[in-house]
Image: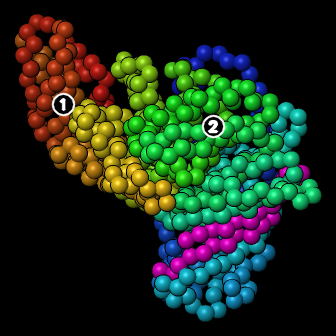
């Protein structure tokens, strides 16, 4: 998901552009006010009782009626004895039946939950499957991708153009699932039926594509674990622009950019840049994680989203202020930070958004040099709220962590998360920092050669701290406590006493804070090591000086 603040800054900095060729989504009013939806949060006993193994989703999408109808079959393993489990499903949809291999099951669908009762209690370790038949008019996305649901739009010739978005709300907006980031299926199959003449670009690999009369059914298989919000439908009369990418892992990865018929030429012109972004991120983070499936990008009627192996792209082929498509670069970064490495709990969502934001800053540095990086980070610092911790220790749902400022603005997950990484790089040096980045993506170098799905993993903030400490060979607990676990920024006090410059850090609470300070004295650049607490005196004579000339320090 793209931060509203980041988007605003980039739009302000970008030169005027021609109107987009693709039409925007049609505004559709909701007939009935819907309750606020969110994803994650504390596990209930009925959620904690089982572990999801596989989803099989068979769904018909009817554009003319703007309805869906289907069956979602979940295969899972009981983690403890249980007579009841729960799935999530938005109240705008209706459940017709729930069945198991033994027949119909009793259920109740209320307040966004499907409660399922078993006649015979599940045993710990038992493998089971439940199928939910459901349908109706799914919630329409009022402001995709930030407020999700279905987007029912149309192309220039009036053909249906449909997309799903649901990061903030969870995939239960349109299919029954366990809406917890810490429980991904090991694999998934989607059987999507649509009107003939349309194409559904979805996750994984296209296994079959059959047309019977006026209906077309496509089977997509996802071979790797996947976030439920990353499961996506993108439906239109798409044209496939195809190429390959030579991965550092040694594989030739199929790359497809699905565009609207009217956008074939701008799509073809942009596609080589996608490969440049892939090469850059592989160099930094290791091989593209899903090279056994594909790298897919699809033109959408909303801005964008990091759907695994099928990145949603709605930036209208516009170059950003730094000369590259920032939207694609950000969403592609999530294939590593979000899809390969997934936070167990939304409280660590900065591992997705802060990391992806800093990847973009690093690309600016690669293209334009250190001064451009300094300027890009300075713009990010200007909008920080510093009101809530970036990485709280307590469980959070998506609404609490993402819109935590309570006034409709994004939290600091993006820019402050990126700044924490930027300052950490200054502290531990490039060699240790980039080693930590690579090991965060692939903790064991052997995993860089794996493509069977076992390369994906869950992580939290402490996992990154431990990796960074190992690479830097020093304790970093103080750094993470100050910059990520609480909101206030440290203050650097400076004063001149005769020929000396006196430096003193004032952290927001009592703690060691040995953060080095960059100093330019005349034409000389110095790195001033600071004590755990107290002052540092630097002889500068009567020369002019500048604090932090490289722009590395996150501070008041």
Q: Earlier in the sequence, mark 1 or mark 2?
A: 2
Q: Residue furthest bottom?
A: 120
Q: Is 59 within the magenta?
A: yes
Badge 1 vs badge 2, beta-carbon distance below 8 Å = no
Q: Is residue 438 left or right of residue 191?
A: left
Q: Is residue 207 left or right of residue 94?
A: left
Q: Magenta part mainly helix, strand or loop?
A: strand
Residue at position x 68%, y 29% from top?
268
Residue at position x 77%, y 56% from top?
209
Kindly state the secondary structure of the residue where label 2 is placed: strand
- Does residue 38 sit above or below 412 in this rendering? below
Residue 217: give its label: none
C-alpha separation, residue under disc 1 versus residue under disc 2 = 47 Å
Residue 16 at x, y percent in the picture:
65, 16
Residue 93 visible in the displayed image:
no
Residue 225 visible in the displayed image:
yes
Residue at position x 82%, y 36% from top?
155
Kindly state the secondary structure of the residue where label 1 is placed: loop
Camera-side residue: 103 or 441? 441
Camera-side residue: 453 or 234? 453
Residue 30 at x, y percent in the picture:
79, 51
Q: Which residues are magenta?
A: 53-79
- Does residue 549 sit above or below 61 in this rendering? above
Residue 516: give its label: 1
Camera-side residue: 233 or 543? 233
- The residue where tag 2 is placed is 243
Q: Residue furthest right?
A: 213
Camera-side residue: 389 or 306? 306
Residue 301 at x, y percent in the picture:
73, 38
- Does residue 75 sit above or below 176 in this rendering? below
């Amino acid at each position: 998901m793209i931060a509203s603040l980041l988007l605003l800054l980039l739009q302000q900095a970008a030169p005027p552009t021609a109107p987009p060729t693709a039409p925007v989504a049609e505004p559709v009013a909701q007939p009935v006010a819907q309750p606020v939806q969110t994803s994650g949060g504390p596990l209930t006993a009925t959620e904690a009782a089982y572990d999801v193994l596989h989803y099989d989703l068979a769904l018909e999408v009817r554009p003319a009626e703007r309805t869906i109808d289907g069956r979602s079959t979940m295969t899972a393993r009981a983690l403890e004895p249980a007579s009841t489990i729960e799935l999530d499903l938005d109240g705008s949809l209706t459940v017709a039946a729930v069945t198991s291999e033994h027949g119909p099951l009793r259920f109740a669908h209320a307040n966004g939950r499907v409660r399922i009762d078993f006649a015979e209690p599940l045993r710990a370790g038992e493998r089971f499957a439940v199928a939910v038949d459901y349908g109706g008019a799914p919630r329409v996305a009022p402001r995709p991708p930030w407020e999700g649901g279905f987007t029912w739009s149309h192309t220039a010739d009036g053909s249906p153009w449909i997309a799903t978005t649901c990061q903030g709300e969870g995939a239960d907006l349109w299919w029954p699932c366990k809406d917890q980031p810490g429980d991904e299926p090991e694999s998934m199959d989607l059987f999507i039926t649509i009107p003939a003449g349309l194409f559904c670009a979805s996750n994984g690999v296209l296994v079959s594509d059959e047309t019977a009369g006026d209906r077309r059914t496509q089977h997509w298989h996802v071979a790797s674990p996947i976030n439920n919000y990353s499961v996506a439908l993108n439906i239109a009369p798409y044209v496939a622009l195809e190429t390959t990418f030579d991965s550092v892992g040694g594989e030739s990865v199929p790359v497809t950019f699905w565009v609207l018929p009217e956008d074939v030429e701008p799509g073809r012109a942009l596609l080589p840049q996608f490969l440049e972004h892939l090469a850059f991120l592989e160099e930094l983070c290791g091989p593209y994680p899903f090279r056994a499936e594909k790298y897919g990008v699809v033109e959408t009627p909303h801005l964008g989203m990091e759907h695994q192996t099928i990145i949603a792209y709605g930036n209208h082929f516009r170059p950003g202020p730094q000369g590259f498509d920032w939207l694609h670069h950000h969403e592609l970064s999530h294939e590593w930070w979000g899809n390969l490495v997934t936070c167990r709990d939304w409280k660590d969502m900065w591992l997705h958004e802060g990391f992806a934001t800093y990847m973009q800053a690093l690309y600016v540095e690669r293209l334009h040099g250190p001064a451009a990086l300094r300027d890009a980070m300075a713009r990010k610092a200007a909008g920080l709220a510093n009101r809530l911790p970036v990485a709280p220790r307590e469980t959070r749902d998506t609404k609490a962590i993402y819109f935590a400022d309570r006034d409709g603005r994004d939290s600091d997950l993006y820019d402050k998360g990126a700044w924490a990484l930027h300052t950490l790089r200054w502290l531990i040096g490039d060699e240790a920092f980039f080693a930590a980045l690579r090991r965060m993506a692939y903790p064991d170098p052997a995993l860089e050669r794996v493509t069977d799905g076992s390369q994906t993993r869950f992580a939290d903030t402490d996992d990154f701290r431990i990796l960074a400490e190992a690479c830097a060979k020093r304790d970093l607990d103080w750094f993470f406590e100050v910059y990520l676990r609480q909101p206030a920024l440290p203050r650097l006090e400076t004063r001149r006493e005769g020929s000396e410059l006196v430096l003193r850090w004032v952290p927001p609470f009592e703690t060691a804070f040995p953060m080095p300070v960059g100093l330019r004295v005349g034409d000389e650049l110095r790195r001033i090591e600071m004590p755990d607490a107290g002052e540092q005196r630097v002889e500068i004579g009567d020369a002019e000086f500048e604090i932090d000339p490289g722009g590395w320090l996150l501070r008041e």
